[in-house]
Image (tube, rainbow, N blue to C red):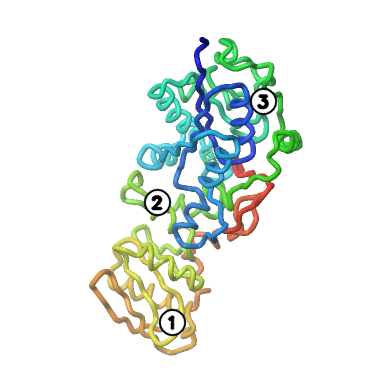
Amino acid sequence: MSEQIRAIGMSSGGLDSLLALALVKQQGIEVLAVHCATGFDSGEIRRGLGWLGENGTAIEDAAAQAAAGAGVPLQVIDVAGRDYNQMLQRPRHGYGKNCNPCIDCHALMLRRCAALMAEGGFHFIFTGDVLGQRPKSQRLHALRLIDREAGLENLVVRPLSARALPPTIPEQRGWIDRGRLLDISGRSRGRQIALARELGFARWVSPAGGCLLTDAHYSTRLRDLIDHAAEPLALGRADYALLLVGRHLRLDARVKFVVGRDARDNAALEKLGRGHWLLEATGHPGPTTLVQGEPGDDDLRRIAAITAGYGKGRAAARVTVQARRGDVQRSLEVTPVDPDNASALRISSRVSEAPARGASEPGRARVGELRVDEDR
Ligand code: SF4
């Protein structure tokens, strides 16, 4: 009896991943879909903040649906943490247009899959990459570099583009039939959409957002956070989620504050406020402000005055602002400061409310559309 070939399919939850999973499974290969969660999935963070509606789809949901569509099991590997932070802060191969270290990120994910391959006795790994689809991480040179960095040179199969690429060891050994793989290349999605129809995937769901590291405004805030963090390697999900909320202002290298833009932001700041000063004007509706760092008395008063300036009491001569951190409470009488006079403190104008390019409104699942979120 011939040996059962087993493969790991790295899945980002997009259509290309779904098609790659289906093409490999079609060859009688036992497939495990693996999704690597980086902690920068816009949909996942929005869900954590209570912003993703019932029908909202995070990347992980889309990966689950792609695996289900292809009829294979899914394993999610959490790659967030110190190793990912280290890579993010000093990627060997640099960033894309924003804070997206796509080459190093892909290599890190592949390394995690390689460990799983060794533990689980799988024969090879494949991905949904399409040659030339993304300007940086999917050129031939980049694909080779990623494989080499992951210690998987000539071992990673790209079923959608295999016949446009040099044969890999799994193809040479006959673990997978190269003749039944495809030769898609370039940015057009026409062939993938035709193939999806041919394979009976009339509808597929793409994530509501995408990777936040490709968002220009988010990246500006992230860079500021990393540059000023006391322990950048210890940054975690709550720190990264906070970057999506409100207006971000920096008083100095030690103190930064986040002013809510609306009730939704204010609720999120309450949620993320553990261990931080939270400020609110009393007697006038207005924002909640979360303060990071160790503000002195003058710092807190200045932030209170700016908080009051963003609220309905901005025209009042004096406004009372309550500051609280855990059980400690302070009442501050301040003269509101016009937000225009604090604009120099803004870290970035605004995190884009629009999700990654190609997506629909935040919190809405998109059906039958394609996500284009890498290398921008
Ligand atoms: S877009 Fe780039 S940085 Fe973000 S998850 Fe994908 S490979 Fe990683």
Which quadrant of the figure has residue 241? bottom left
Q: CA distance from mark 1 to mark 3?
A: 60 Å
Q: Image height check: is 224 above or below 4? A: below
Give the mark nearer the N terminus: 3 vs 2. 3
Write down the residue under mark 2: 237
Give the mark nearer the N terminus: 1 vs 2. 2
Residue 102: horizontal and vertical position, in percent?
Answer: 53, 37
Q: Which mark is residue 336?
A: 1
Q: What residue is drawn where x is 46% and y is 65%?
A: 345
Q: What residue is drawn where x is 40% and y is 51%?
A: 237
Q: What residue is drawn where x is 35% and y is 62%?
A: 292
Label 1: state its secondary structure: loop
Write down the residue under mark 3: 161
83, 338: nearer the viewer: 83
Q: Nearer the viewer, mark 1 or mark 3?
A: 3
Circle 2 residues within 10 Å: few <14, some 14–19, many ≥20: some
Residue 94: horizontal and vertical position, in percent?
Answer: 51, 36
- Callouts 3 and 2 close, C-beta under 8 Å: no
Which quadrant of the figure has residue 90? top left
